[in-house]
Amino acid sequence: MSPLVFRVLGPLQVHGPVGPLRLPPGRQEVILAALLLEVNRVVSTNHLVDLIWEDNPPETARTQVQICVSRLRKLLAGADGEVSITTRPPGYVLHTDAGNVDAALFTTLVLRARRLRERGELHEAVRLLRDAVTLWQGDCLSGLDSGPLANKARQLNEERLTAVELRIQLELELGRYDGLVGELQRLVHEHPLREKLRGQLIQALYWSGRQAEALEAFRTTRRFLAEELGLEPSRELRELESAILAGRLPAPAAPTPTSVPTSVRVSADKAEEQTAAPEVEEEPEPTAPPAPESVRQDAVPHQLPAAVADFVSDAGQLAALEEALTGRPGRTTVGLAAITGKPGTGKSTLAVHVAHMLSETGFPDGQLYCDLRGTTGTPATPEEVLGRFLRALGIPGQLIPESLDERAEMYRTRLASRRVLVVLDDACGEGQVLPLLPGSRGCAVLVTGRARLTALPGAHRVELDVLAEDRALELLSRIIGRERVAGEAAAAEALVRTVGRLPLALRIVAARLAARPHWTLASMVQRLANERHRLDELTHGEMTMRASLSLTYEGLAPDDRRLLRLLSMAQAPTLPSWLAGALLDDRRPFPSDLMEPLVDVQMLDVAGVERTGGFRYRFHEIIRVYAREQLAAHHTPEARQEALARMAGGWMHLAQQAHRKVYGGDFTVLHGDAPRWEPPDSYTDEVLADPLAWLDAEQASLCGMVEHTADAGLHDLSWDLATSLVTLFEVRGHYDLWEQTHLSALAAVRKAGNLRGTAAIRASLGSLYMSRNQFDTARQSLTSALDVFQALDEPMGEALCRRDMALIARTSGDDSSALELYRRSLADFDRAGDVVGRAIVLTQSAHIRMRQGETTAAQGQLDEALDIYEGVGYTGGRARTLRRVGQLLLEQGRSDLAVLTFTEVLELCRDSGDVIGEGHLLRDLGHAFVIMGRPDRARDFFDRAVTAREGVMDFSGGALARLDLARLLDAEPGRSRELLVPAVEVFRERRMGRELAEAERLLATGY
């Protein structure tokens, strides 16, 4: 029996065994389209009602939807296809093979193509992308009349163009330039605003030998953008033009296939320290330790902000949200609720209150929280949020994959057996939220945002408006006291009406009253009288909000107003108290005293407490906007630039001190000459007691400051801060942030003609590319940086470049070149006086000595490196070197000493919470006990290594430990087979040929 085939990529069509199936136009088409777009997933009845009637559904809407679904069931059943529509609260599911729906098949093909590209299989990836695009027969759901569905269709249309652009990029990498020119000219004509297509056309023309036409294509683009949009071409297009004019536009090289899976990205530091044992060559190494809570297998996140003590509740609203999130017994889908409304209506407050209310009884396995920054200019990306959540759930940064789909898969897997509440605050739209939804019915998601978020399937929606009068009075009473409100009941009612019952405005006015107990409520009503017209408009948006805020602003002392204005320049999610001192150039020992007057009138909120005991602060976004307007009105550009330089100098000072504490000094990093602003020494010492934890906590602020200084032209601070943050990026595996910050800083130093900064950024990017196994790109970047450093006679820069170039040579098997580069790097580090750099080179080159059998030379280098690390207190370097010592002892037959050494390093890993390092050391100990003829002890360590590696979803490391264990279990064929079968699948998927061959051989011999 032939299945039904559904098409939505074009007009909605259904093809059955005997030909096309005629669909009744109208509502049934809309419902079928909605079910197909979510095939095999629940679509709520409320969502279907919204699709058909949008704003004004009739009372019989749900009944009419039921009738339409019933008719669709009969229609599809009569077509004799393997498809069904079943009722599943809170709506319906269309069940069929996803391959029978062209949209689902398109998504699958594109995903497979992206994975093939990452493996270097470009020809097959191009074929799949061509197959995916041929599924389209026009614009998605063309001819179907439904506004909300049109939004989803536009999203799919965009994905189609993205797939076309990806396919063209791959064909360019394969050298098919001539054949692409005509197609690209047509695509540019059809989609004139897509600059990526225009850039690809320029490249295809140039690499086809048509340089003049390539330049003309760029000039046509410049004219079009200027005339139509008043814009200049993007930076990428401008750089293409410059490269063509200079004759320096190299043809793209296809990526080299790699056996390292995309879900395990090995950093440069990891690759440098790989073990000599063949089967361990591709594993990440133990590094400077991550914070314990970020890597524990049993991590239970508690990320909710503090609840508001004076929250006033609506009992019905709370009950409805509780039911939506916790559900009734037998619920089969994730609980989902969305709180929406105008600014200032208390969306976040309600969400946090509900989350705390349900945290212990409803979701004992933890609560995840993220501010999605939907109302800012830089909303959080789903990839960024998933990275944060995976770390909170115990996955080390080094094991978090790069692609959105793989991060989402790992996230859903991690939550599959847990009861976790996810709070997503300030979403900009459904597209930002959908990848963050768990798949488990035991979990729930609570979303807030200004948009209505109607396309979230099955979501219970709460739209907040202004407070009812009784609740507004209750809020006022909780802030200023019940006796005071009862004593002036009429004035209290008048005051609530005057501010429009908007929670934020009411809190601001009430804060002023609380700060001035001698004022009467009637006097405050009188004060607001002149603003009555604007305050009556308070519920309509920002303009009237500005009038309300101005009342509080004008009541501040001059210095407090100045601080409020300058604080608005900070782009960090929360503000440490030292920022106030930096902005005002005030070096008092307790800078939080400068912030507190703003807290008193609720122009700033207290967001938390630092380890120093000082407070962190946060702006409400509307207040920040108001403060920025005042900033522009009262401060010259020069004054703003000076304050920004002090603020950035403070972040730079703290980041530099954090690096020194990790490495024992200013080692293995270049610095610029921009001035620092130093917070009080006592503050710096306390906040950096755990430097990596501080870098982790301030990650968003530090990365934001790199981009802020780059945009502002403070190029020396921008590159210096970016390269200093590699301390964090390498340890936590934040490769996306590494690249993002460095590219921003690179643009700034290039624009300023800063050669030293440009070389420093290029050298650091070279390390990043090595971490991603992009060795050709890394070599180019490092060579370019080295040329500049040599011209500048900068020994530290030369040392860093040659060290990393040696690693590339070593990885490719060119030991002689690697040793020569290490020799020159060692001399450079000595010239620069960098002892830690020297120790790193000694440890890395010792690996080659061990491989060549020069054990005496290797031992001498490792001993010297250990002396250096112990002298400066660099724990991460000491752990890596001690592990090499243990491996050398094994090669020398000194197994007892090797075990003692491995045990010491294992304790270092456990003390620091380094689960990856713990897995390595457990295997090392297992190998040692095998050599010592003690299989029972070896088996115990290999067993524990399997648990440790797979516990953090490091399946390749787990498979290696399974293979180790299977070798010992020849007397237990059943257990060995149980170990080897999943290991074979991992080895095959990740192209670990040597290990796959051995595992299959063991299976074939009776295991």
Image (cartoon, rainbow, N blue to C red):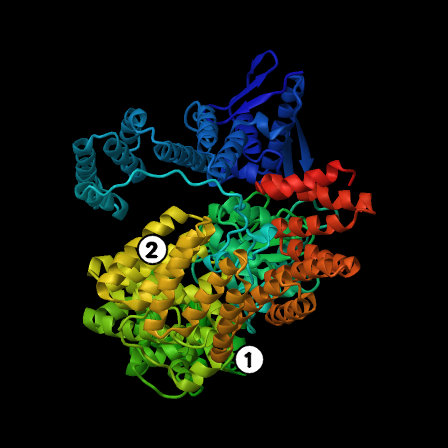
Q: Residue furthest right?
A: 971
x and y, in percent, of residue 486 in the image: 53, 79
The 10 Å Cα crowd at callout 1, few under 14, some 14 to 19, many 20 or more, is: some
Q: Amino acid at mark 2?
A: Leu
x and y, in percent, of residue 910 in the image: 63, 69
Q: Is residue 852 left or right of residue 171?
A: right
Q: Secondary structure at mark 2?
A: helix
- Please identify the quadrant where the N terminus is shown: top right
Q: Amino acid at mark 1?
A: Arg
x and y, in percent, of residue 991 in the image: 57, 40
- Say if residue 202 shows up in the picture: yes
In-front residue for pair 685/905: 905
Circle nearer the N terminus (2, 1): 1
x and y, in percent, of residue 712 in the image: 25, 64
Q: Which mark is residue 782?
A: 2
Above or below, 252 relative to 85: below
Gap in Å between the C-alphas at discs 2 and 1?
Answer: 68 Å
Q: Is residue 936 left or right of residue 948?
A: right
Q: Which residue is mark 1?
A: 482
